[in-house]
Amino acid sequence: MGLSRVVAEQLLKTGFARRAVKECADLSVFKLRPSAKMIFGLACIAVSYIICWPLISALSVFAIYIREPLLIVIGSPVIWTVAHFMCMFGMYLAGADYSKAFAKYLVRIFVEKNAPDKIPGRSPSLWR
């Protein structure tokens, strides 16, 4: 028995995998028009990536110019933390529904490929 089959059988013991197979999870959610919430979330992620290191670099140059190294020591982690939280907020807004749908789809495909005979209520002959 291969490792992938063992993992698939263990996944089938979870409610998430059983629901994914039962609902025949697919990627149809990606065909829908993105909501304003998702677009705003993706914008937050993009802005967090754009501002983080350039802003830290500019702060470093400014701190060197005014000869205040403590500004780098304190300011850089603060900027990085703000950018990190902005990215996490964007992920929260943009990715929750899409990430879950994608994960369900991957689990369903993995289980159906590696342990079709262990799926409750389905005959193995249906998978060929």
Image (spheres, rainbow, N blue to C red):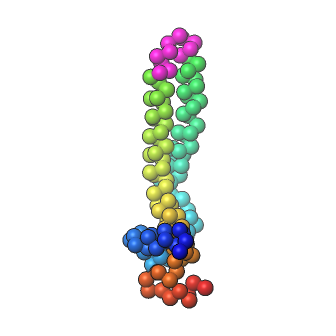
Q: Residue at x 50, y 15 (%)?
A: 69
Q: Residue at x 46, y 81 (%)?
A: 119
Q: Is residue 35 visible?
A: yes
Q: Nearer the viewer, residue 104 or 97?
A: 104
Q: As displayed, is residue 69 above or below residue 87?
A: above
Q: Nearer the viewer, residue 17 or 105?
A: 17
Region in magenta: 63-73
Q: Quadrant of residue 52?
A: top right
In the rendered view, does 90 fall on the left or right side of 50?
A: left
Which residue extends farthest top? 67
Return the x and y of residue 96 as percentages of the image width and height. 45, 57
Q: Main secondary structure of the magenta part?
A: helix
Q: Is residue 20 visible?
A: no
Where the C terminus falls, by quadrant?
A: bottom right
Q: As displayed, is residue 120 above or below residue 47?
A: below
- Whether residue 23 is in magenta: the answer is no
Return the x and y of residue 10 as percentages of the image width and height. 44, 70
Return the x and y of residue 20 as percentages of the image width and height. 46, 72
Q: Residue at x 56, y 64 (%)?
A: 30
Question: How many numbered callouts?
Answer: 0
Q: Residue at x 55, y 21 (%)?
A: 60
Q: Quadrant of residue 46?
A: top right
Which residue extends farthest front? 1
Q: As displayed, is residue 107 above or below residue 45?
A: below
Return the x and y of residue 44 as percentages of the image width and height. 51, 44
- Whether residue 72 is in magenta: the answer is yes
Q: As displayed, is residue 107 above or below residue 68?
A: below
